[in-house]
Image (spheres, rainbow, N blue to C red):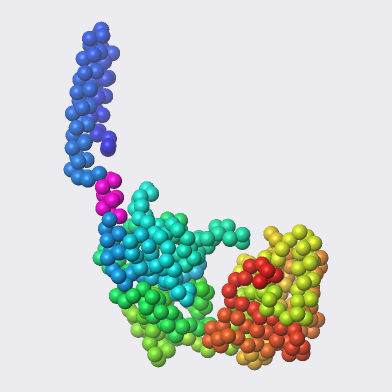
Amino acid sequence: MKKNSKLHNILSVVVGSAPSLRGRAGGEAVLSFVLLLSTLFLQSCLKDQEDVFDKSSSLRMQEVLDKTKAALTGNENGWGLDYYPNRELTYGGIAYAIQFKGTEATVYSQDAEKGETSLYKLTNDDGPILSFDTYNSLMHAYATPSPDEYEAKDGDFEFIIMDVQNDLITLKGKRSGVMMYMHRLNLPANEYIDAVKKIGEKMQSGKYAFVINGDSILTRRVNNVFKFTDPETGETIDMPFITTTSGFEFKDTVNVMGKSVTGFSYSENGIWSNPTDNSVALVALPQPLTEFLTTANWFFKASSISEKAMTYFNQAKDGSAAEGEDIVYMILGPNDILDYSGKFAFSFVSGKYAGSLHIEPDILTDDIITLYFAGTAEGDGVWYYNNANYNYIIGVLTGPKGFSYTLTADDPKQPTWIKMVRTDDPEIYFTVYKEQIARPFDN
């Protein structure tokens, strides 16, 4: 109850006069008067509270849960969820679609081939909660810990219900605190996800440019985040987005060189305009395999390294084992993934240690590249090169004078893997992957 200043003043006056009263009766009289005033004002406060809250908190909570249940199960097509699994928005947004029936939820994701059914519940946990509390590999993909990610990817599977409208439900990740939205679907959930995937494929590219007032400015895409460097200020702007059935939609409106950008709508002509300002557009640019290789991080796994090349990699494996360590990651590309300088390198994590051995790439054609050892390193790269046989990996990758490779891939527009075959010895080859591969010697 809010403190009543008037009551406080009256009690101060009454109690303040008590020492001048003599005898027990006087004290009882003061106490009776104080109790009488307290009762009167308490009744007044309670009456005020009843006027403001005509229902108990538990009843109001249940009404929110009932309203949410009715909304979720009331649409047979289901609900789209714009899911942002990380409080730093590192991954951008992932499109989900969920059909609710009884206590079951069938979840679809743009990253999965088929849906998966599990249980959900609506409950009270210091607020109304939508919880997918039984394991679902799609719903828990960013929330399940592993030996290499004990905090998972900071994803949510429990959501605080912030607001419920007929066509829109506002949620907040219980763990991440990220605001997310569910929107009523007008086509079945699986068809919605299929439509999202098709748009995503059509707008996929390894290289993009923003066109602003006729000027073209290169931008990078990392996961579902565009990274744009403002040429006027030099500031790098992160633009997390999600793929919809009509294009890319930014999580929040972004200011780009004085323009308010909300996203980009797909069109067949390859120039995708900002819905609110046609002077801003996104264009996909062709990118050769050699550029894909040198501008992204690619992960090794033993099963995709030729037998002849493995004799060199096994030397490093044994070198780490001699230190009581397993090799956790082996990476080819800009070593910014380990918070180093971003120079192209062979990078690694061995046990609790990490390092990079810098490599200078020389692009010869769209699909032929030569790699040279730069002779420099970061982190614990020098130590592992000199003491744990990592010089053998450099030996097979670059040799003392450089080795050239012919590149092939699964998808020239957006490869998920690139095969590198040595031009001087086709029995030496590696396939590197865009997907993060932990414990490469176990894969």
Q: Measured along the vertical axis of the image, is residue 388 above or below residue 55?
A: below
Q: Which quadrant of the rendered structure holds the N terminus?
A: top left
The secondary structure that most of the magenta stretch takes on is: helix
Nearest the eye: 214 or 185 = 185
Task: Give the residues drawn in magenta, as a range.
Answer: 57-65
Can residue 295 be seen in this snapshot?
Answer: no
Q: State left or right for residue 169 relative to residue 270.
A: left
Q: Residue at the far top: name it.
A: 23
Nearest the eye: 62 or 393 = 62
Instruction: Report the residue at 24% width, 34% height from top.
Output: 4
Residue 441 x/y as whole percent:
70, 70
Residue 105 x/y as whole percent:
38, 64
- Residue 383: image quadrant is bottom right
Instruction: Report the residue at 18% width, 37% height from top.
Output: 47
Can residue 70 be seen in this snapshot?
Answer: yes
Residue 139 x/y as whole percent:
45, 65
Q: State left or right for residue 405 relative to residue 296.
A: right
Q: Is residue 317 magenta?
A: no
Q: Measured along the vertical axis of the image, is residue 357 above or below residue 52?
A: below
Nearest the eye: 184 or 40 = 184
Q: Measured along the vertical axis of the image, is residue 133 above or below residue 405?
A: above
Residue 381 x/y as whole percent:
74, 68
Q: Which quadrant of the rendered structure holds the C terminus?
A: bottom right
